[in-house]
């Protein structure tokens, strides 16, 4: 199967390797000529995945060349620039291509999920857009450590097509029709990971971590239910599975950035220290807007937004969360 991956960062490169190991003929597209040359000539991505040897794959800075003949097109670019990038690439998309979003976020200007942005930007039906989400830390997968993921698409045949294209000896995909739930899990878990990172940065321990993760899952579930998602999705790989991995691992960019903030860095200092895209920083505001639009209470998300984009300290956020009125434990 011919496949194109748009985005030569750590996750895009890793997913290209996953598909190549699954037997696909893969072309990786990126804007950085040095990265593209490294992948094509040396089977390396020294900038994002040092010490990882990649399988054979083509790499190019020519998007039209990458998309030519591609049955599966994977999008792994920063979520807030996705619309403009994809609109420019629309003429080069094959008429039967299935497009896969690896992006985690909600668009700032519209509060739309990334699968919706992809469908609109490329002018294709939502049934031709799949999303992939799960406990998928790029570095571990690039090292071929075993993991599983969820491929969600409203068209079952297209979900199966994408699952077949990325199934190999160390990467196991499960299919799901709940695109809304899977996408929301991927977007909101980054925000909860920021909160956990902030807690770790302040020296708080595992009780705090477990509390934030568990109540964070409640926030994800509330928003998902309000938008019509399947409740079972939140206890699965895309929900609890991805949440645990992203919140607990030092490989998580959102956790790392949150930890820097918790240690006293400004947001700009934390972004520079992290060095790579942490999607939760920008999407936190759009997720909160989406929640407010639907009347959904998300206090952890609101706290993260106030710390990152307002003037609230991490200590004040913790105090505010603990001072909320007592009530029975519930996901509603």
Image (cartoon, rainbow, N blue to C red):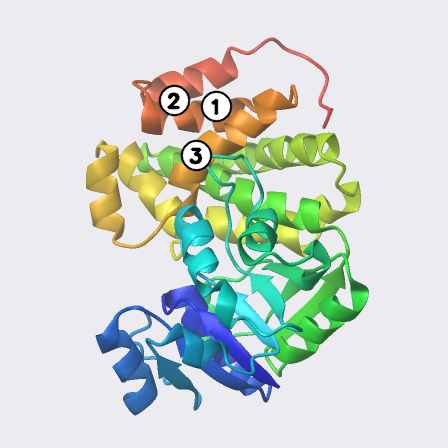
* Left or right: residue 52 compared with residue 55: left
Of pointers 2 and 3, the one earlier in the residue sequence: 3
Taking the spot 58% from the left edge, 50% from the top edge, the residue there is 120
Q: Which residue was labeled with disc 1?
A: 302
Categorize mark 2 by other alpha carbons within 10 Å: few (<14), some (14-19), many (20+).
some
Mark 2 and mark 3: span between their CA atoms?
11 Å
Is residue 300 toward the left or the right of residue 262 in the image? right
Badge 3 element: helix
Q: What residue is at 75 percent from the left and 72 percent from the top?
A: 160
Q: Is residue 76 above or below residue 236?
A: below
The count of marks equals: 3
Residue positioned 55% across, 38% down in the render = 213
Query: Would you place residue 330 above or below residue 181 in this image?
Result: above
Q: Which mark is residue 195?
A: 3
x then y, percent, for residue 202: 32, 32
Residue 25: percent from left, percent from top: 53, 88
Q: Dot 3 surroundings within 10 Å: few (below 14), some, or many (20 or more)?
A: many
Q: Does residue 136 sit above or below 41 in this rendering?
A: above
Q: Are marks 1 and 2 in contact (CB under 8 Å)?
A: yes
Q: Residue 19, position in %: x, y? A: 55, 80
Q: Which residue corresponds to the image point at 63% horizontal and 64% vertical from the top-left? A: 149
Looking at the rendered structure, the secondary structure element under dot 2 is: helix
Give the residue pinned by disc 2.
306
């Amino acid at each position: 199967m011919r496949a194109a991956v748009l985005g030569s960062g750590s996750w895009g490169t890793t997913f290209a390797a996953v598909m190549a190991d699954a037997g696909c003929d893969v072309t990786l597209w990126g804007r950085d000529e040095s990265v593209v040359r490294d992948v094509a000539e040396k089977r390396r991505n020294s900038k994002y995945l040092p010490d990882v040897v990649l399988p054979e794959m083509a790499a190019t800075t020519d998007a039209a060349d990458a998309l030519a003949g591609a049955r599966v097109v994977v999008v792994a670019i920063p979520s807030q620039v996705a619309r403009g990038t994809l609109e420019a690439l629309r003429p080069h998309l094959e008429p039967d291509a299935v497009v896969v979003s690896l992006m985690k976020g909600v668009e700032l200007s519209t509060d739309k999920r990334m699968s919706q942005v992809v469908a609109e930007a490329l002018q294709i039906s939502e049934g031709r857009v799949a999303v992939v989400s799960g406990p998928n830390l790029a570095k571990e997968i690039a090292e071929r450590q075993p993991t599983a993921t969820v491929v969600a698409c409203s068209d079952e045949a297209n979900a199966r097509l994408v699952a077949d294209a990325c199934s190999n000896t160390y990467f196991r995909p499960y299919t799901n029709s709940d695109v809304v739930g899977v996408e929301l899990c991927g977007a909101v878990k980054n925000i909860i990971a920021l909160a956990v990172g902030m807690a770790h940065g302040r020296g708080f321990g595992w009780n705090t971590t477990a509390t934030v993760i568990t109540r964070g899952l409640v926030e994800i579930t509330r928003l998902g239910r309000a938008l019509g998602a399947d409740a079972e999705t939140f206890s699965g790989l895309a929900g609890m599975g991805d949440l645990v991995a992203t919140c607990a691992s030092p490989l998580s960019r959102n956790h790392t950035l949150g930890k820097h903030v918790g240690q006293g860095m400004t947001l700009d200092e934390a972004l520079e220290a992290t060095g790579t895209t942490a999607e939760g920083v920008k999407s936190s505001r759009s997720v909160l807007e989406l929640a407010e639009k639907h009347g959904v209470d998300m206090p952890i998300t609101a706290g993260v937004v106030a710390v990152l984009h307002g003037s609230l300290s991490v200590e004040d956020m913790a105090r505010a969360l603990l001072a909320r009125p007592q009530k029975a434990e519930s996901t509603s």
